[in-house]
């Protein structure tokens, strides 16, 4: 497997991915190995079912929505390694890029990723029904329908600044202004 990884991933690609995502070359090679292990068809692409082979996503109550967001910017039902890395880069702890270029893992981009998880129908707004879908995923049957409805109603009421009954990205961003999103949406990647 190690020879396949190094033979298919060229140094130029590693350099480009490092520049784009901020991952170290060692991390890129390790994640490429993980990518190729998930790619059971050996096509160089991952499909939704391939990501369901990641145990951490399967047990996560929001795993299905997380997986769907990997494919949000894709024109097809598959993603390549670079698209995979761009999504993973959102979960790196935030550090400003030295060259002045905006990093993928900014607070704004992390919030945009989280917003897309809640925006189930991808219309640019979070409606009460969408909020209920995510709440159901997160808490299952641990609280009553009435409690879930109350949480959804209160969330909409507090975040909906223009009183249209939905939460736009700007309202979502404003509602989470004081939240430590950079910390909450960061994963430590091994070197």
Image (cartoon, rainbow, N blue to C red):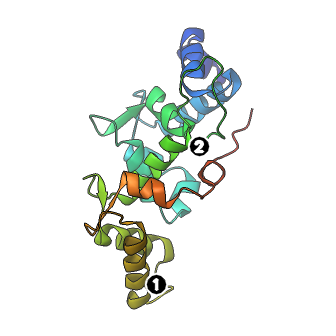
What is the x, y in percent for residue 171? 40, 57
Label of residue 141 in the image: 1
Label of residue 82 in the image: none
The answer to whether any part of residue 136 appears in the image is yes
Front residue of 8/153: it is 153
Residue 167 position (above or below residue 189)? below
Task: Name the residue: 55% across, 38% down.
Answer: 106
Q: Secondary structure at mark 2?
A: loop
Task: Name the residue: 66% across, 51% down.
Answer: 183
Left or right placement of residue 136 versus residue 182 in this view:
left
Q: Secondary structure at mark 1?
A: loop
Front residue of 30/111: it is 111
Task: Name the residue: 47% across, 56% down.
Answer: 174
Q: Which residue is mark 2?
A: 91
Query: Which class describes the residues within 10 Å of circle 2: few (<14), some (14-19), or many (20+)?
Result: many
What is the x, y in percent for residue 73? 34, 37
What is the x, y in percent for residue 74? 32, 35
């Amino acid at each position: 497997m190690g020879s396949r990884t190094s033979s298919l991933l060229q140094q130029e690609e590693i350099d480009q991915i490092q520049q784009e995502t901020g991952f170290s070359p060692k991390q890129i090679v390790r994640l490429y190995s993980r990518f190729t292990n998930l790619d059971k068809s050996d096509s160089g692409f991952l499909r939704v079912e391939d990501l369901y082979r990641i145990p951490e996503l399967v047990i996560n109550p929001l795993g299905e929505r997380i997986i769907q967001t990997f494919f949000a910017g894709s024109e097809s039902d598959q993603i390549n390694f670079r698209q995979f890395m761009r999504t993973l880069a959102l979960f790196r702890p935030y550090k400003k890029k030295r060259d002045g270029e905006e990093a993928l893992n900014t607070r704004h981009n992390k919030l945009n990723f989280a917003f897309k998880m809640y925006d189930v129908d991808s219309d640019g707004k979070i409606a009460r029904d969408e909020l209920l879908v995510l709440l159901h995923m997160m808490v299952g049957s641990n609280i009553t329908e009435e409690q879930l409805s109350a949480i959804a109603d209160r969330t909409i009421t507090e975040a909906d600044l223009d009183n249209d009954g939905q939460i736009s990205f700007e309202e979502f961003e404003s509602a989470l202004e004081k939240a430590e999103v950079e910390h909450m949406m960061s994963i430590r990647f091994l070197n």
